[in-house]
Amino acid sequence: MKQIDIKTTQKVQIIDITGKVAVYREIKDGCIVIFVPHTTAALIVNEHEPNLEDDMMHFYTTLAKGDWHHNRVDNNAEAHLVSTTLHSSIVVPIKDGELTLGTWQSILFIELDGPKERKVYVKELTKNVS
C-alpha cells in the first residue's frame, strides 16, 4: 500500500490528486483503491474546473450550516455532516496500465476541516488469473 501526504491550507479545499495517484499504477489490468482515513475529508471523481471548484466549495460550506450538538465538542459538526454525503474511498479501474477515467474526470481530495496534514492510501488490486 502506498501513502500520499497532503497538507491543506484552507478550511474547505479541493485538491486534484489524479497525478499523485497515477504514479502508483504498477499493474497492467486491475483496479486501484484510494482511501482517505479521516472523518472530515473525502474523495470524489469529478471535473477539475475552477468555476465548478468554486461552486463545490460554496456548496460544501453552506450545506450543513446550523446549530449542531457536536459543535460543543470541537466545533466541526458541519465538516462531519458534509463528509457523510461524500466518499471515504473510490475505486478506479486500470486498463493497459492507465487509469480509466473519463475525459473530464479527476480524482479530487476534499478537505472539510482544514488546514490539516492528511493522508491518502492507494492500493492496487490485480485480477486473479485461474
Image: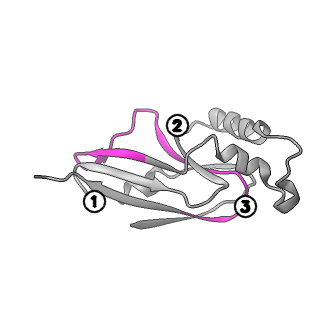
Three-letter code for the amino acid on which mark 2 is drawn: Asn
Give the residue number, with chain letter if any, for mark 3.
Answer: 115
Counting residues from the N terminus, which is met first, the one under dot 3 or under dot 2?
2
Q: CA distance from mark 3 to mark 2?
A: 22 Å
Tell me which segment is drawn in magenta. Answer: 91-119
Please give left or right for residue 27 compared with residue 55 in the image.
Answer: left
Residue 100, quarter of picture? top left
Q: CA distance from mark 1 to mark 3?
A: 32 Å
- CB-based contact (under 8 Å), mark 1 and mark 3: no
Q: Is residue 81 magenta?
A: no
Q: CA distance from mark 2 to mark 1?
A: 24 Å
Give the residue number, with chain letter if any, for mark 2.
Answer: 46
Query: Residue at point 65% right, 33% down?
Result: 51
Counting residues from the N terminus, which is met first, the one under dot 1 or under dot 3?
1
Q: Secondary structure at mark 2?
A: strand
Image coords of residue 38 (percent x, y): 61, 60
Image coords of residue 24 (percent x, y): 36, 60
Give the residue number, with chain letter if any, for mark 1.
Answer: 26
Q: Secondary structure at mark 3?
A: loop
Is 117 in front, or is 129?
129
Is 32 in front, or is 25?
32
Above or below 9: residue 69: above
Three-letter code for the amino acid on which mark 3 is drawn: Pro
Above or below 6: residue 103: above
Query: Residue at point 55% right, 39% down?
Result: 48
Using a 10 Å C-alpha cutoff, classify the residue at mark 1 as few (fewer than 14 neighbours), some (14 to 19) or many (20 or more): few
Please give left or right for residue 31 compared with residue 120 in the image.
Answer: left
Query: Residue at point 55% right, 51% down?
Result: 88
Q: Secondary structure at mark 1?
A: loop
